[in-house]
Amino acid sequence: MSKGDKLEVLDFWASPYCGRVKIALEEKGVKYVASEEDVFGCKSDLLLKSNPIHQKVPVLLHNDKPIVESAIIVTYIDEVWPSNSLLPTSAYDRAQARFWVDYIDKKVFETGRSVWGSNGEEREVGTRDFIEVIKHLEEALGEKNYFGGEAFGYVDIIAISHSPWFLAYEKLGGFKIQDHTPKLSAWIKRCLKRESVAKVLPDPEKVYQFVLHFRKMSGLD
Amino acid sequence: KMTEVKLHGFWYSPFTLKVKWTLELKGIPYENIEEDRFNMSVQIFQYNPIYKRTPILVHDGKPLCESTIIVEYIDQIWPENPLFPIDSYERALARFWIKYADDMVSAIRLLALSSNSEEQVKAIEKIWEHLRVVEDRCFNDHEKKFFGGDTINIVDIAFGSMVKFITVLEDALEVKILEYEKFPHFHLWYNNFKNVPIIKENLPDQDKMLAFLKFSREKLLGSS
């Protein structure tokens, strides 16, 4: 890493998509600035200019050049700062990692939303769907310490960034992840011990309050 | 070194086409296994238990799923004639546009299965939104003939597979979507793209696709 590198993350504290970018930068030991965006209110000119198409966080600005889409950003970070590799080296293992990252990002937040963002039967269906998703993840994890094997890596970073929302899903869905996927629960605890993860991820209780507030504002409560 | 590459897919799928074009452009010998959507081989469920769908690439017995993941894998294992940019920033941009192209499929599907003019108009407008973004943002470098420069790359392939579909829908539904007046650069780009020899040789037959679309609409909508 050259001394002149300027790194800024356009951020939102509760977003799992922002969390993973920050974790990746922490893992690489790279200095960055996180700028909180008012995503529900007034987005900054910088955000609108950096991500004109989707107008969403996260955006990584590397010497003022924007990179968008969190999984793409994490891959970029791994390529630019190759020490302490996050992605596996073998092409097949990389493909497997990408598959799980794609699955996690297609399913976890969306099924989670159907738990916290609805009521009654819709929520019951959502809860079942979410549990099915974490069961698939449990299977993918198997007996390994991390999704990639012995070392914390790309899939772990993507997956763990969703964990601050799990308390909200559990409380509103009336279930405990521990009961359905004990290995995944153990993996969550293991990841939370990691300095990068502990430093970056928000308190699940704070996320839960945020969700409850959002529900009220949306007329769900 | 003898390697065995098999591609399970549907001849009419833009995602299968993306993988096919990638293999053809790199000159990688492979066995094409045509799957029947309504009667897929048992292996599909073994190779892709989560999504149970094609395309699936099987390389020396090891399965790979999801077209975007497959093409990155191919580019890594067979690095000659790279289809992904070498520079990390350019790679990040390419990955963004590949995803953007893939995201067009939901509007394309909506249009393919539209059962009334209101649905049709809505779907076309969604497609136009995407085309507008690409038209406005991707053709500012007038030196470049293709997304890949002088030769096509993975972004050309990603958009090309979707646009091929759009042209079939234009014919089938008698609507204009990739209009020259609205999207002059994109229109010109596609004309150049489809005439690249390997692409031209591997473009699904338009009449065959029209017939297939008609058949699908009848089957799924009970009408054409």
Image (cartoon, coloured by chain):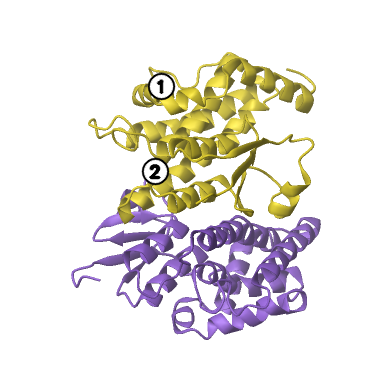
Chain colours: A purple, B yellow
Measuring 63% from the left and 77% from the top, which residue is drawn there?
A: A144
- B193 lies left or right of A98: left
Q: Which of A76 and B80 is in front in this view?
A: B80
Quarter-of-image position of residue B153: top left
Measuring 72% from the left and 25% from the top, which residue is drawn there?
A: B216
Classify A170 as above or below B26.
Answer: below
Local SS, label 2: loop
- B17 lies left or right of A48: right
Give the residue furthest to the left. Answer: A4
Local SS, label 1: loop
**Residue B157: horizontal and vertical position, in percent?**
45, 36
Quarter-of-image position of residue B11: top right
Q: Which of B126 and A140 is in front in this view?
A: A140
Give the residue furthest to the front. Answer: B1
Is disc 2 in contact with disc 1, using a CB cutoff of under 8 Å?
no
Quadrant for the N terminus of chain A, please.
bottom left
**Residue B184: horizontal and vertical position, in percent?**
35, 21
**Residue A75: horizontal and vertical position, in percent?**
42, 61
Q: Does the rendering let one see residue A36?
A: no
Q: Which residue bears the numbered disc 1?
A: B195
Chain under disc 1: B
Mark 2 surroundings: few (<14), some (14-19) or many (≥20) residues within 10 A: many
Classify A39 as above or below B24.
Answer: below
The three-letter code of the residue at mark 2 reads Leu
The three-letter code of the residue at mark 1 reads Asn
Chain under disc 2: B
- Give the alpha-carbon distance from disc 2 to disc 1, as whole Å: 18 Å
**In terms of sequence position, does the residue under pointer 2 or pointer 1 come before the other?**
2
Q: Does the rendering let one see residue B178?
A: yes
Q: Which residue bears the numbered disc 2?
A: B83
Measuring 60% from the left and 55% from the top, which residue is drawn there?
A: A106
**Residue A35: horizontal and vertical position, in percent?**
34, 67
